[in-house]
Image (cartoon, grey):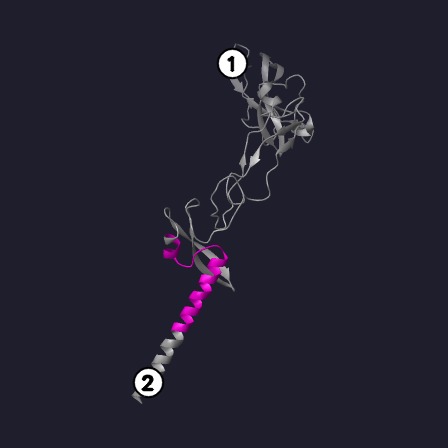
Amino acid sequence: MLKSLALLGFGILLSASMFSCSKLGNTSSACNNAGYYAEQSECQNSISSGSCSAATVLNEGENLVCWKSTTTSNQTGNTSTGTGTNTSTSCNGQSPPWTMGAWAPATCGVGVTQRTRTVTCDYSCPCVLPQPSTTETCAPNMFLGRHYESECPAAGGTLLWIDGNRVCSMSGFSCKSGWSQYYYNSATPYTITTAASAQEHTNCVGGRTTVTTGYHSSFTPARAVETRSYCSSRNCFGCKTWTTLKANISSVACF
């Protein structure tokens, strides 16, 4: 009886050991296929400096924990050859960004039909695809294609988006020459206003009180310019003249 129990225990331990080795083998194979390491110690031993971090690999419906190096220049294990100007051939599945030069000319504007820039991959590993374009066609890119963005600050305005359209905010109650005022539904102009005030006559012996209009400090939502009626002339029988007071327009949206 004791001998049978001993043999049974040994069989269980042997099966568990074989299952453990098999699972470890599968993990190692899946990690290596993904360009990673199965053990943290294996990852750390393969690099001369830097550190390793965990990475998850999906294998046969199961998430396996692998290890990858966070150092791209000193790795020696699990490497693949990439393309670029650097001499390192350690990629480990990494896709570095492209190096892009400045646009020339710097901005699109009147008379500029195209801009160009340099786009290079300054790494041994292949950069993220697709490669960014090296050219850009210049066309008026503000609302209705009438002006370039660079023309707005040149006219003393500020670029902004209203209802998904690129327009130019200009100080004052009207747009500069060559620009048109931007309307909501072709009816209400986009404006910013400040309160206006006036002296209302309250009686026939010189009584006065200050009245003010409302105002709005942002372009959206579109609002009509605020108004208020007040008595600007009165005698002892009542008001002789009613006047409409309008808020001051401080900025307008133009295109």
Q: CA distance from mark 2 to mark 1?
A: 111 Å
Residue marked by disc 2: 5
Within the image, what quadrant is residue 147 found in? Answer: top right
Q: Is residue 27 above or below residue 149?
A: below
Q: Nearer the viewer, residue 129 or 230?
A: 129
Residue at horizontal 64%, vertical 23%? 109
Q: Is residue 237 above or below residue 109?
A: above
**In the rendered image, is residue 251 in sight?**
no
- In which quadrant is the C terminus drawn? top right
| Residue on which disc 1 sits | 208
Q: Position of residue 156 (x, y in %)?
A: 57, 18
Residue 134: in sight, yes or no? yes
Q: Nearer the viewer, residue 225 or 205?
A: 225
Q: Is residue 219 above or below residue 123?
A: above
Which quadrant is home to the N terminus? bottom left
Q: Residue furthest top?
A: 205
Q: Main secondary structure of the magenta part?
A: helix
Q: Please, what is the three-letter code of the amino acid marked with disc 2?
A: Leu
Expressed as whole percent of the image width and height from the top left, the position of residue 195 reads 54, 21
The circle on residue 76 is: none
Q: Is residue 201 left or right of residue 20?
A: right
Magenta residues span 17-44
| SS under mark 2 | helix
Res. 36 image quadrant: bottom left
Residue appearing at x 50%, y 60% in the figure: 58
Numbered disc 1: secondary structure: strand
